[in-house]
Amino acid sequence: MTTTSPVRSRVAGARAPNWRSAVVYIGFVLVFAFFAATQTEYFLTWTNLSNIVVQAAPITIMAMGTVLVLAIGEIDLSIGSTVAVAALVTAMTVETTGSWWIGALAGLATGAVAGAVNGLFITVVRLPSFLVTLATMGLLMGVARQLTGLQSVPVTDPSFTAVFGKGTLLGLPVFVWWTLAATVVAFHVLRQRRFGAHILAVGDRTQSARVSGIKVDRVRMAVFMASGGAAALAGILYTGRLQGARYTLGESDLMTVLAAVIVGGTALSGGKASVIGALVGSLLMSMINNGLILAGLDVTDQMIVRGLIILVAVSLSLRGKKND
């Protein structure tokens, strides 16, 4: 009994609301109101609002994996490259086998293997996750370029594009359902399962978690595999939406995902996480990009805005950790 109480207390503490947890929701309302007032002709149309949700879907799914990684006090810089490799493997498998579900399984397996490689170097070789995932980011980037010789791989299977791309279910785009599914799974794992308590305990005080009987290395391995799988699913969705895959998929997503997760309330230093905050943060980032495009600003301006958001969010996160 005494060995589990520290874990439970830290989970309870992670749920305690504070002003920083409301930043993403306040920001979402303010940004929405700003663009609704300044871009009245296009922003509030159903087509545009639907596009915001659809464009946020891959980011949200990657964010669900990143929430778990940051919650254990680690970081995964390789998710963007994993997206590209998994997308290419998926497209090539679908076109070779003619089976959309075999292609999807191959893509998910690719992501899980990439995550397992990261996990092995972190848990066995004892290298920092920053260095490991920085290295695998470059490695996977090279693999993505070599797989098809810098050529795109089209996907012509209508079943694949219906399930992972432009299909609808109950009147809603399938991207919405994939987003909801990923969010529900992440929320269930983090809040309703014992494994979620272990994740938060490892991120908050690793040595205490180890003493209390938690298999710290197993938790880290599982989390990195989940992160790789989430990135792979994002790559599969990109492939379905674009009806093909290319080596550049996901290359600019890392900064957006980190911004969404950190501004959503997940502590960069571990021990605190917010799945719903990450969901809202992802929608916020998508809405900002959408609004900036409607305002006539280019990709460079979007990068500047994302960078500023990350700086503010990280500052709030680290300050909150010191004050706890």
Image (tube, rainbow, N blue to C red):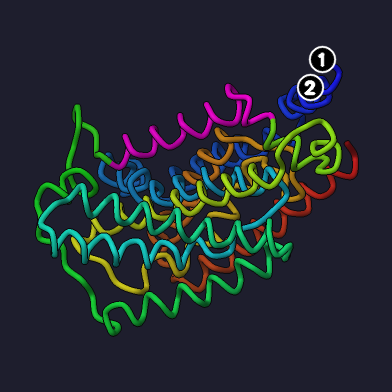
- Indicate left or right for 4 with 125 as reference: right
- Indicate left or right for 138 with 150 as reference: right
Residue at x-position 39% and y-position 55%: 232
SS for tag 1? loop
Q: Which residues are magenta?
A: 175-197
Q: What residue type is disc 1 on?
A: Met
- Indicate left or right for 6 with 235 as reference: right
Q: Nearer the viewer, residue 185 or 93?
A: 93
Name the residue carrying label 2. Answer: 4
Residue at x-position 30% and y-position 83%: 150
Picture coordinates of residue 273, whole percent (x, y): 66, 37
- Indicate left or right for 45 with 121 as reference: left
Q: Main secondary structure of the magenta part?
A: helix
Residue at x-position 83% and y-position 25%: 6
Name the residue carrying label 1. Answer: 1
Picture coordinates of residue 117, whole percent (x, y): 54, 62
Residue 151 belongs to the span the image colors magenta? no
Quarter holding residue 75? bottom right
Picture coordinates of residue 113, whole percent (x, y): 45, 58
Image quadrant where one finds the N terminus: top right
Q: What residue type is disc 2 on?
A: Thr
Q: Which residue is farthest bottom?
A: 149
Quarter holding residue 12? top right
Q: In the rendered view, would you say 94 is above or below 148?
A: above
The crowding category of the residue bearing disc 2, from other C-alpha atoms within 10 Å (few below 14, some 14 to 19, many at least 20), is some
The crowding category of the residue bearing disc 1, from other C-alpha atoms within 10 Å (few below 14, some 14 to 19, many at least 20), is few
Residue at x-position 55% and y-position 36%: 29
Q: Nearer the viewer, residue 127 or 324?
A: 127
Work out how far the residue at label 2 is from the one at label 1, CA to CA, in angstroms: 6 Å
Residue 182 belongs to the span the image colors magenta? yes
Picture coordinates of residue 207, whole percent (x, y): 85, 42
Q: Nearer the viewer, residue 37 or 174?
A: 174
